[in-house]
Image (cartoon, rainbow, N blue to C red):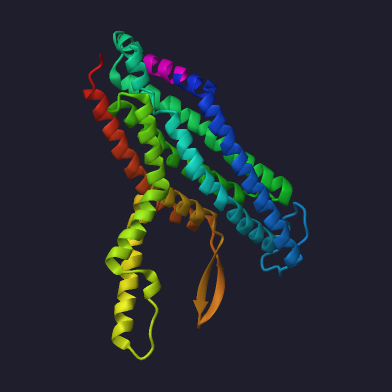
Amino acid sequence: MGGTYTILKKEFLDNIGEAKFLLLFFTLLVVVAASAISGAQSYKLQANSQGIPQGNGTSGRPGEIPGQGGNFRIGLMLNSLSQAITPIVENIAIVGGLLAVTLSFDAINKERSSGSLKVLLSYPIYRDQVLIGKFLGGFLTILVVAFSTVAVAIGIFSYMAGLALTTEILLRILSFMLMTIIYLSVFLVGGLLFSIVIDEPATSLLASIVFVLAGVVLITNLGSSVATLIAGSPYNFVTQTGNTGGTVVRAQANQLYQGIVTVFNYLSPSTVYQNAVSMVMRTTTMSFEQGTPVSVTTPFSQAFMDMLKMVPILIVWFIVLAAGTYMGFRRKEIT
């Protein structure tokens, strides 16, 4: 454990001191801060249009009518916070993913090419300890990134919008942080895998960037393309009156199209992450009672359970990449 801790400490200090990390981290902070400012302004406009008083007061009784603050205002805050977090999550999905792979794309091959890895393994230290130390050093860095970016975003939003940080809101924010950590860990271990299987750091960086782009954009776009090839274009699913047979075919085609797109969305770490955060931040859902739309409150417990349904997909991604990383490093010849 002493060797693992030493490698972890060195990796963490190296990460936070590198210019590439600081540049991406600063970029991420700027984009999430801009998103939070935009969300706060949106909340103010919505609050003014509803006649809801500004300030941090949260007093009120269940069933208060709109325009008198209290629970209605808290619900509006949560919905506005959810809207503000949407662009924040999108920015984290891209910039955060790139930041995660930059922490690990040269963790092994750089030391291997310089000869320091061979010297390190000549000491009484196992390969497992090296790999675990490298990962934990990057993971600790990710913890700093996740808590810092989310704290900055929520802090700005709270200050500008007068958001009362109730227990309900804090639980949802902590869940958001949890999903961010899990999501970034997938790309961290992905970069570590490329640093093992690819000897040149420049090439492994390129492969890592492609991996991020695939997880954020390419998989979902591929899903739409495959669905269009198999089921046809969604623009052709318009029902034609007087043609019952055609209507059934188009309904089935639309169902097939949506099914294919959904499968590919579940393969995309970015889409899974964004959907999970959207679920845990959701405060209301629409229901129908006798054909009339009704807004139903979604408690945190239900939203959290909905979010947890998405977590296994990211865990599978992590396990597959971690297994490949472990097996690759165990079999890698160190020269």
Residue span colored magenta: 1-10
Say left or right for 205 vs 282. left
Q: Position of residue 207 (x, y in %)?
A: 35, 35
* Relative image position of residue 61 (x, y in whole percent): 70, 63
The magenta stretch spans residue 252: no
Residue 97, percent across and down?
45, 39
Residue nearer the viewer, 89 or 254: 254
Q: Is residue 241 above or below residue 77?
A: below
292 with respect to 216 (left or right): right
Residue 7: say if magenta. yes
Tell which of 2 and 46 is nearer to you: 46
Q: Residue 157: x, y in percent? A: 67, 47
Q: Examine the image and state in which quarter residue 119 appears.
A: top left
Q: Which residue appears at 34% of the width and 21% of the height?
A: 109
Does the rendering let one see residue 22?
Answer: yes
| Residue 166 vs residue 102, the one in the foreground | 102
In the rendered view, tell whether residue 252 sits above or below residue 123.
Answer: below
> Residue placed at 53% from the left, 55% from the top?
300
Going 75% across and 51% down the picture, which residue do you hit?
A: 56
Q: Is residue 9 above or below residue 51?
A: above
